C-alpha cells in the first residue's frame, strides 16, 4: 500500500501484536476470512523467527470500580459479566490462540499499553517494531497505534488483519489517520518485508 515500507531486518526485534477476542470476532463481516488472514500472518512471522503477542480486554472483580465520568465504565458495567476475565467472550479466539512463549497481556482499557506491562516486556526483549492487527480498527488498533508511536516503536498496521463494525471508519483510519504514525501494509506485502538474510 506504500512504497515507504521498511524491511524488518531482525526477527528478534519485531512482534506481531493482535487483539482477537472471541466475543468480538463474530461481530465483524467476513470474520472467518479475517481470521484466516491473521492465521497466515502468525504462521509467516513465526516461521521467520519473529514473536507473537496478544492483548485482551478483561476485568477482574476489582477492576470494575470506574469513576462516574467514565464512558467505558458505563459500558462495561452494563454488559454484566461479558467483560469479566473468566468469561469465554474475553478469551482469544481459538483459531489464533497463543502458544507457550507468546506475549499475552490483559488490559483494562482500549489501548495495549496504558494498563499493562507490555512496554516493559517488549523493552526487555529488544522489540522495537510492532505489526498490529485487531478488532476493532477504531478501538484497539487506533489506540495502540497512537500509544506505540508515542513510545517510539516502528509501527506497521496489517490493513487486512484489522476490521471494524463501521467500514467507513475502518477505511478512513487506514487511509487518512494511520499513515501519519505508521506504515499501512497487507498480508500479501508482509513476506517481502521480512529479511531472510
Image: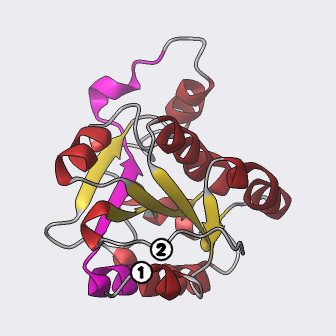
Which residue ends up furthest to the left in the rendered image? 100
Residue 131 image label: none
Q: Secondary structure at mark 2?
A: loop
| Residue 27 or residue 52, whichever sits in front | 52
Magenta part of the chain: 42-66
Q: Residues within 10 Å of mark 1 (few under 14, many from 20)?
A: many
Q: Residue at x 26, y 55 (%)?
A: 104
Q: Quadrant of the C terminus?
A: bottom left
Q: Is residue 57 magenta?
A: yes
Q: Residue at x 57, y 29 (%)?
A: 72
Q: Position of residue 152 (x, y in %)?
A: 45, 41
Q: Which residue is mark 2?
A: 7
Q: Earlier in the sequence, mark 1 or mark 2?
A: 2
**Do tag 1 and tag 2 residues touch (Cβ < 8 Å)?**
yes
Q: Name the quadrant containing residue 170.
A: bottom right
Q: Residues within 10 Å of mark 2 (few under 14, many from 20)?
A: few
| Residue 134 or residue 10, whichever sits in front | 10
Q: Residue at x 36, y 32 (%)?
A: 115
Which residue ends up furthest to the right in the rendered image? 168
Q: Residue at x 30, y 71 (%)?
A: 10
| Mark 1 vs mark 2, CA separation in Å | 6 Å
Q: Secondary structure at mark 1?
A: loop
Residue 194 image label: 1
Q: Is residue 143 above or below residue 61?
A: below
Q: Quadrant of the N terminus?
A: bottom right
Q: Position of residue 9 (x, y in %)?
A: 36, 72
Amino acid at each position: 500500500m506504500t512504497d515507504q515500507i521498511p524491511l524488518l531486518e531482525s526477527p528478534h526485534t519485531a512482534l506481531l501484536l493482535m487483539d482477537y477476542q472471541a466475543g468480538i470476532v463474530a461481530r465483524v463481516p467476513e470474520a472467518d476470512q479475517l481470521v484466516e488472514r491473521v492465521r497466515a500472518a502468525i504462521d509467516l512471522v513465526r516461521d521467520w523467527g519473529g514473536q507473537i503477542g496478544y492483548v485482551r480486554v478483561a476485568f477482574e472483580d476489582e477492576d470494575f470500580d470506574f469513576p462516574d465520568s467514565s464512558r467505558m465504565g458505563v459500558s462495561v458495567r452494563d454488559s454484566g459479566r461479558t467483560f469479566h476475565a473468566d468469561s469465554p467472550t474475553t478469551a482469544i479466539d481459538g483459531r489464533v490462540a497463543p502458544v507457550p512463549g507468546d506475549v499475552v497481556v490483559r488490559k483494562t482499557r482500549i489501548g495495549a499499553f496504558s494498563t499493562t506491562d507490555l512496554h516493559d516486556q517488549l523493552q526487555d526483549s529488544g522489540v522495537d517494531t510492532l505489526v498490529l492487527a485487531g478488532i476493532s480498527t477504531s478501538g484497539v488498533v487506533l489506540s495502540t497505534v497512537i500509544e506505540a508511536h508515542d513510545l517510539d516503536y516502528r509501527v506497521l498496521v496489517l490493513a487486512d488483519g484489522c476490521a471494524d463494525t463501521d467500514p467507513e471508519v475502518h477505511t478512513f483510519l487506514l487511509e487518512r489517520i494511520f499513515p501519519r504514525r505508521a506504515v499501512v501494509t497487507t498480508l500479501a506485502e508482509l513476506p517481502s518485508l521480512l529479511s531472510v538474510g
